[in-house]
Image (spheres, rainbow, N blue to C red):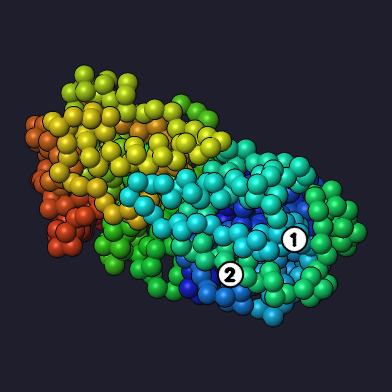
Amino acid sequence: MSTPHYVTLADGQMRVWRSGSGPDLLVLPGLIEAASVCADRLASALPGWTITALDLPGTGGSVTCWAEDIAGLARLIAEAAGRLGLPACPLLAFDLAAPLARALPEAGWRPDGLLLVNAAGAEGWSERGLRPAPLAPRADGTHLAVLWAHLRDAHVLEPRDASHPAKAGSPLPTPAELDTMLRSAAGAPARYEALWSICLDAMRSKSDSAGGAVRVDGLEEVAAHLAPMAAGRKPAGPPPPTRPFADPLRVWHDYADTPAGRVHLRRAGRGRPLLAFQSAPGSSAPLLPLLHGLAPEREVIAPDYLGNGDSDKPERAVDIGVLADDMLALADALGLESFDLWGTHTGALVALDLTVRHPDRIGRAVLEAPVLIPADFSADILDHYFPPLAADRWGLHLLQAWNMRRDMFLFWPWYRQERAAARAIGVPAAAVLHDWTMGLLASGGHYDRSYRAAFRYDTRAALVRLTRPALICAGPADMLVEGLAEARTLAPAGTEVMPTPATVWYPGQGDEAVRETIGCYAAFLTTGSDMTNPHPVA
């Protein structure tokens, strides 16, 4: 399996996927296959090479990198290659990435040989003007079905004849592989749509003779061309560590390796570290308001749980204790001896468990809306809340994920479709709901594991064991806010229980309420978090 890594540029980050061993081979995967899938496929077909496949600008983990023309996009790729320390090495470019590959020498990075794969297919798309239909998020989620059909047809149909299936070419992608590409393209749908048009138009204006490009079809032909290029080249070294932005308040992405798997992180700020734990089942992306709000006074690190978001998906049983162990291992990997915690919903339980079992490592903990509901309600949720979510050949899972996410804003619990279960929070704008759905899809078939853990955890037994200062809180729109009343009866000395003006990671919260709530967190975390007294405070 390929390994993801971020490289920080002057004004954004690009994500690359590395696989294999041997000399360097840089890969631009094109616009219909995800870089991770491409890297894995090439590592199997081209042993003896270290594959570095880029999420192209505007896609996947490179959505923050963007330019409006081929030259600008190529400069971003050249900058990434330089910061990765890639020497002049062979370059493999698929389908519509050909114009980007041809522009790299002028952008500042010259490949040692350029192979264009499926250039004829891309030319066919150019001849008939194939472009994705508008991909702006729609309130009903059907833009995802449109994108799925576009990607699937690009693989299935003859490039010059949209009415017939192609009888030759690479093996068709599996539903899981197509889903990976959809998530890469849908990270910023407008940029993917623009990238396709920029590259499609550029196919008409450049000749393959530029830069000595060689057209190849199929990986056997690729391997034959690459074989004589490997002699005398040094094996690739490890990628350099990912760097933060010069502005310490800007959120940047990173990965950390733990014994259980590679953990994806969002990071911002400097100072005493705070680990921020998400709700389930998506990623830590909804916590961006928290990172922005607290970063001026501390370093905030928001991981995706293993099994969720962009972290690894190990096959294992999961409970809150396992997730807490993962987070302690993450702290060890980051060299954090002492730190504070903030967690919401599932994350509040992870923070609680970690604080109870490892009080010597924790300063103070904010526990937002820990799960305190009746046992029969938990049992009902475990029976009905978590239908299977698996990639489908026709993309049917996309509307399932969209409507599950949408109904989570309409009802509590979402599957209880009745007036009495209606929520007051309201459905967010389509673009916001799109981002939330992408987090759910990133977790895929593993989405329910951390989520289920929250409803199996004995929150009451853990709360009374707190020995570190803790703040238990919830905003008025939080479906778990009623648990504050019981928390007051369970909380030991040194624990504060209070409502907050907002749930900062919910959409649609007022700006002033969010600022006041961030202020509550900051005031609590700033008081006595130097670990000079490891016992409860009054």
Q: Is disc 2 placed on a helix, strand or loop? A: helix
Residue at the limit of the structure toward the front, as seen here: 163
Location of the N terminus (image quadrant) = top right
Taking the image as drawn, is residue 241 in sight? no
In which image quadrant can residue 102 be found? bottom right
Along the line of sight, the residue nearer the viewer: 282 or 390: 390
- Percent position (x, y) of residue 113? 81, 67
Residue occupying the point 83% across, 65% down: 214
What residue type is disc 2 on? Ile
What residue type is disc 1 on? Ala
- Percent position (x, y) of residue 371? 23, 33
In which image quadrant can residue 295 be found? bottom left
Residue occupying the point 49% across, 64% down: 191
**In the rendered view, does 187 fall on the left or right side of 229?**
left
Q: Which residue is under mark 2? A: 198
Along the line of sight, the residue nearer the viewer: 148 or 97: 148
Q: Are marks 2 and 1 in contact (CB under 8 Å)?
A: no
Residue occupying the point 79% across, 70% down: 208
| Residue 507 versus residue 205 in the image, above or below | above
**Residue count near mark 2 (Cα–Cα under 10 Å), binned few <14, some 14–19, many ≥20:** some
- Percent position (x, y) of residue 245? 45, 70
Along the line of sight, the residue nearer the viewer: 454 or 407: 407
Q: Which residue is under mark 1? A: 119
**In the rendered view, does 120 fall on the left or right side of 325?**
right
Tell me which numbered mark, 2 or 1, is placed earlier along the sequence: 1
Along the line of sight, the residue nearer the viewer: 436 or 210: 210
Residue occupying the point 18% across, 23% down: 374
| Residue 239 versus residue 88 in the image, above or below | above
How far is mark 2 from mark 1, CA to CA? 16 Å
- Percent position (x, y) of residue 168? 78, 44
